[in-house]
Image (tube, rainbow, N blue to C red):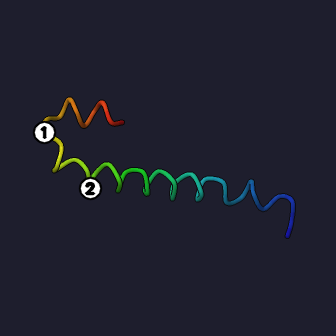
Amino acid sequence: MDAGQGHVDASLRVGIAGALGMLVFAGLYPVVPSAAVAAALL
C-alpha cells in the first residue's frame, strides 16, 4: 500500500463517517419528544 493513499481517500472516509452519523440521528429524530432534545443529542 502506498503511503500517500491515506491523503487521497481521506475525504471519502470523512464523508462516510459523517453520513453514518447523520443516519443514526436521523433515525432517532422521530422518537425524541422535541427538537430541543434532538439537538441536545448531537
* Residue 3 or residue 25, whichever sits in front: 25
Residue drawn at x 37%, y 51% is 22
Q: Name the side, left or right, on which 15 lies relative to 30.
A: right
Measuring from the top left, give residue 29's x and y in whole percent. 22, 47
Give the alpha-carbon distance from disc 2 to disc 1, as whole Å.
13 Å
Residue drawn at x 16%, y 49% is 31
Are the two marked residues, 2 and 1, in contact with CB atoms closer than 8 angstroms?
A: no
Disc 2, SS: helix
Mark drawn on residue 41: none
Disc 1, SS: loop
Mark drawn on residue 33: 1
Residue drawn at x 16%, y 50% is 30
Measuring from the top left, give residue 16's x and y in whole percent. 51, 59
Give the quarter of the figure containing the C terminus. Answer: top left
The crowd level at tag 1 (other Cα within 10 Å; few <14, some 14-19, many 20+) is: few
Residue 21, relative to residue 2: is it above or below? above
Tell me the amino acid under the disc marked 2: Gly
Residue drawn at x 75%, y 57% is 6
* Closer mark to the observer between disc 2 and disc 1: 1
Residue 34: quadrant of the picture: top left
Q: Counting residues from the N terminus, which is met first, the one under dot 2 or under dot 1? A: 2
Residue 30, relative to residue 42: is it above or below? below
The crowd level at tag 2 (other Cα within 10 Å; few <14, some 14-19, many 20+) is: few
Give the quarter of the figure containing the N terminus. Answer: bottom right
* Residue 35 or residue 31, whichever sits in front: 31
Measuring from the top left, give residue 15's x and y in whole percent. 51, 54
Q: On the image, numbered disc 2 is attached to which residue? A: 27
Tell me the amino acid under the disc marked 1: Pro
* Residue 41 or residue 6, whichever sits in front: 41
